[in-house]
Amino acid sequence: APAPEPRVARVERRQGQHLHFPGMATRRAALIGDAFVDVQVGGVGALPCWGTDVACSSVRLLPGGACGNTARQLGALGGCELEAFFYSCVGDDEPGRHYLRTLEAEDSLTSPSRTLRLLPGVPQSCCVILSGSEDRAMCSCYETVHRVTTGLFSAELLAESWALVHLGGYFNCVGLHDDALLDLLRALKARGTLLSMDPQHDCSGKWSGEGGHLRRLLPLLDVFLPNEAEACGIASVGEPTAVATAEEAIDQLTARHPSTLVVVKAGGRGILAGRGGERWEVPAAPVEAFVDATGAGDACSAGFLAQVSRCGDARGCLAFAPPPLRVRRSVLVSLLCPALLLTVPLLTAVSARPGGRAHRVAVGRGSGCALREPRGRMRDAAGGGGGAGRARVRRRQEKRRCQ
């Protein structure tokens, strides 16, 4: 196998793909959590009953997992400013090796063959996703995900300096529900590392972690990124009545953990957030037609974390809300646009190819302005861009910077 590309060479190569201003430092982010192979079944009209069959429109094999999705999106959004390292486990079988090959081919993450632990004799965690017109249902194997533990990565994480450490798919990764993780996070926090977490759905319905672990974890976090259902489930723990709305959940969670910024992903409503007694709301970008909700929340987390890693002020990132998105024709924005809403202060244009794919997103007035063209599968979702367009945006950005 060819030798891994040196970090300096990779950063120099990425500088040719993104606008990069002198003095812009490269930061490092570590993401720890679940890695799934998703069997994406699209166009399901109704869920099948036992002993029956239903038709679908497509079946795709894709890399997934809440943390895996966020890591790949963050690596793509970070460009030459941010290196994303994804720590997880994969099975030493064909699905697991497919996952690893796909990440290496996408080239949005740094050294995935080193940071992903290959587990001999363990089936790769897979998730069958049945996507309908408005929502989806899932069936999952958790074998490798349940074997993700702090001990597999703690020495490497403590040996490096990190701008951000993010936990993803927390409820899936029951091996992280121990004191070793808390000790690791305390050590990283003492060094000034920003700590964040996206909990993912709790299929046990307890919403508290093993032995109430989540109650001890939440005070250590700088940013907590649940969706509305997860926020309500977690906020309801220990309460006499169930919490029913995102606003109620934010009130409960910020009262218990006033120093943690709670960012709730509320689907079509957009983002609701709070810390202490402060509250913010960022509306979702309008879309002409719903395409697929799978991975949208993970991409939104990545967009927020990309901006956090730039400015270091988690609360200030919520001020970067652009004017309403201008969409021509039907554009696939379920993955990309929620992230861009929190990543940049001004979204200047989204144009469409025949077939409805957004192919150029020019952003400006932000820290590390860039013309972003995600690679691999994310490029397929958002389309590509032309060299002439890149040159025009580069000239405009350089002129603005000089002024």
Image (tube, rainbow, N blue to C red):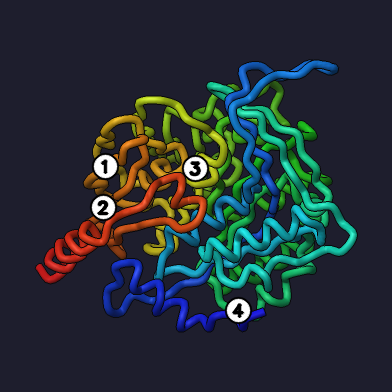
Q: Earlier in the sequence, mark 1 or mark 2?
A: 1
Left or right: where does residue 246 sit relative to residue 400? right
Element under disc 4: loop
Residue under numbered circle 1? 351
Q: Earlier in the sequence, mark 4 or mark 1?
A: 4
Give yes or no for contact between labels 3 and 1 (Cβ–Cβ under 8 Å): no
Q: CA distance from mark 2 to mark 3?
A: 26 Å
Give yes or no for contact between labels 2 and 3 (Cβ–Cβ under 8 Å): no
Residue at point 30%, 72% (across, down)? 20
The local crowd at label 2, few if under 14, some if 14 to 19, many if 20 or more residues have their Cα within 10 Å, is many
Residue at point 51%, 80% (across, down)? 7
Q: CA distance from mark 3 to mark 1?
A: 29 Å
Element under disc 3: strand
Left or right: where does residue 393 sit relative to residue 262? left
Residue under numbered circle 3? 263
Please indicate, yes or no, whether residue 259 appears anywhere in the rendered image. Answer: no
Residue under numbered circle 4? 160
- Front residue of 29 and 397: 397
Q: Earlier in the sequence, mark 2 or mark 3?
A: 3
Residue 401 in percent (x, y) is at 16, 68
Residue at point 62%, 23% (across, down)? 44
Looking at the rendering, in which quadrant would you find the N terminus?
Answer: bottom right
Q: CA distance from mark 1 to mark 2?
A: 10 Å
Q: Nearer the viewer, mark 3 or mark 1?
A: 1
Residue under numbered circle 2? 362
Residue 110 in percent (x, y) is at 56, 70
Element under disc 2: strand
Tell me the kind of residue under disc 3.
Answer: Val
